[in-house]
Image (spheres, grey):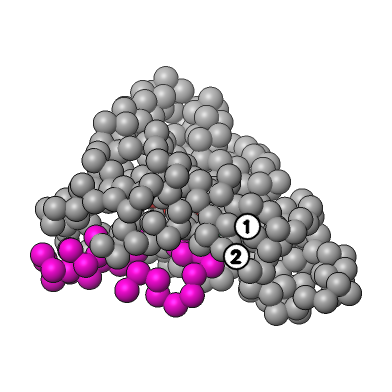
Amino acid sequence: MPASDVATLLAEMKGAVQENVPLAPMMHLRIGGPAEWFVEPFAEQDVALSVRACNEHGLQLHILGGGSNVLVSDQGVRGVVIHLGKLNRIVREGNRITVGAGVTLPSLLRTTREAGLAGLEKLTGIPAVVGGAVAMNAGTRDGETFEHLVSLTVVQSDGRIAILSREDCSPKYRNGGLGDAIVVQATFELEPDEPDAIYARFAASLAARNKSQPVTQRSVGCVWQNPKGDAAGRLVEESGCKTLRANGVAVSDKHANYFVNDDTGTAEDFVDLMRQVRSRVKQEFGVELQPEVKFWGFSGSCIS
Ligand SMILES: Cc1cc2nc3c(=O)[nH]c(=O)nc-3n(C[C@H](O)[C@H](O)[C@H](O)COP(=O)(O)OP(=O)(O)OC[C@H]3O[C@@H](n4cnc5c(N)ncnc54)[C@H](O)[C@@H]3O)c2cc1C
């Protein structure tokens, strides 16, 4: 981009704008190259202005939440990555709690527990921020993000701000169904309960998760979507993939739907392992696994 355009872009983008920012430290997996542009808006109006600036300059736009479900290519990402970490307000009104998209789920869960508001503890252990949890309709077998949602503020792809009620949304399994809209704020309606009772449920979920998932290792959570009526982890395990690895990335021996990075892995290793596993599962069960992880900065379908 010519220097004059860069100057215009910087003036139009509202928030802290940086060029060539390494993304790996922000990703749960600790893998990936830099973002060409990295923007941290201070308020939802700034998100809207940044979206309009991207549209105007024909720049690709990615929204980064907690980085727990994204694989960034080793070459990084062209265009603009918007990070909503500065949208971090939490406001309580009765049983309702309104949260900025950049608030982490663990911090929201701590707040609601201390306030004696129950419901969100079913999301215990998901290392997302609120925006990412809504966008993906993150959940566990106990329930999902949209269950307690009453309304959302989003920035639409044309840069306009809109308020959506729960009835306006059609969430699906691990997909909030919001298309290109950017979640900037969410309001949840919760139920009053004793903080100790909420804490007990929270601790039980955490203990169960620690037993069955490699929570202390670098991963993106589940790599593959569960095929209808089956579990991707079972297919991976029973096709003999649990010992597979590609350099620094290995199939977890605790949960076969997780790949873990030993801190030396690259995005290319991750994709290589995906190809190996996918091909073995296809051979063994005739099932073509579909990725749950989102790919940024890759061209075409990198796993086929
Ligand atoms: C150890 C581990 C355990 C996990 N366990 C679970 C689990 O139990 N259940 C589950 O559902 N998931 C789980 N995940 C996956 C992941 O946490 C979820 O998919 C989560 O919703 C991703 O949120 P994030 O904030 O990290 O988003 P990111 O990974 O940063 O982004 C994910 C997608 O959401 C989009 N996005 C992010 N923020 C916004 C926004 N504000 N507006 C619009 N789009 C946005 C991104 O562009 C991207 O497409 C796990 C992951 C890990 C690493």
Which amino acid type corresponds to the residue marked 2 in the rendered image?
Val
User: Is residue 275 in sight in this rendering?
Assistant: yes
What is the C-alpha distance between the residues marked 2 and 1? 6 Å
In the picture, measured across the screen, residue 250 lies left or right of residue 219, that is: left
Task: Give the position of the C terminus as an image quadrant.
Answer: bottom left
Task: Give the structural element (helix, strand or loop) at label 2.
Answer: strand
> Disc 2 designates what residue?
77
Residues 280 and 230: in front is 280
Toward the front, the furthest residue is 247
Residue with the mark numbered 1: 34
Q: Quadrant of residue 164?
A: bottom right
Residue 177 on image: x %, y %: 45, 67
Instruction: Please report the residue visible at 86 percent of the width from the left and 72 percent of the height from the top.
Output: 3
Place residue 121 in its image quadrant: top left
Q: Is residue 297 magenta?
A: yes
Q: Nearer the viewer, residue 18 or 156?
A: 18
Q: Is residue 3 left or right of residue 215?
A: right
Whichever of labels 2 and 1 marks the residue nearer the N terminus, that label is: 1
Image position of 156 (left or right of 67): right
Residue at (54, 37) in percent of width and height? 108
Q: Is residue 224 above or below residue 118?
A: below
Task: Give residue 194's position: percent from left, percent from top.
Answer: 44, 23
User: Where does the image place residue 91, in percent across and percent down from the top left?
Assistant: 65, 39
Q: Is residue 93 visible?
A: no
Q: Secondary structure at mark 1?
A: strand
Q: Residues at badges 2 and 1 in contact (C-beta under 8 Å)?
A: yes
Q: Amino acid at mark 1?
A: Pro
User: How crowded is the residue under tag 2: few (<14 C-alpha within 10 Å), some, or many (20+)?
Assistant: many
Q: Residue 89, relative to residue 153: is it above or below?
A: above
Specify start and end residues of the magenta stretch as a single range.
Answer: 277-304
How packed mark 1 is, by other alpha carbons closer than 10 Å (few <14, some 14-19, many 20 or more), is many
Up/down of 221 relative to 153, above or below? above
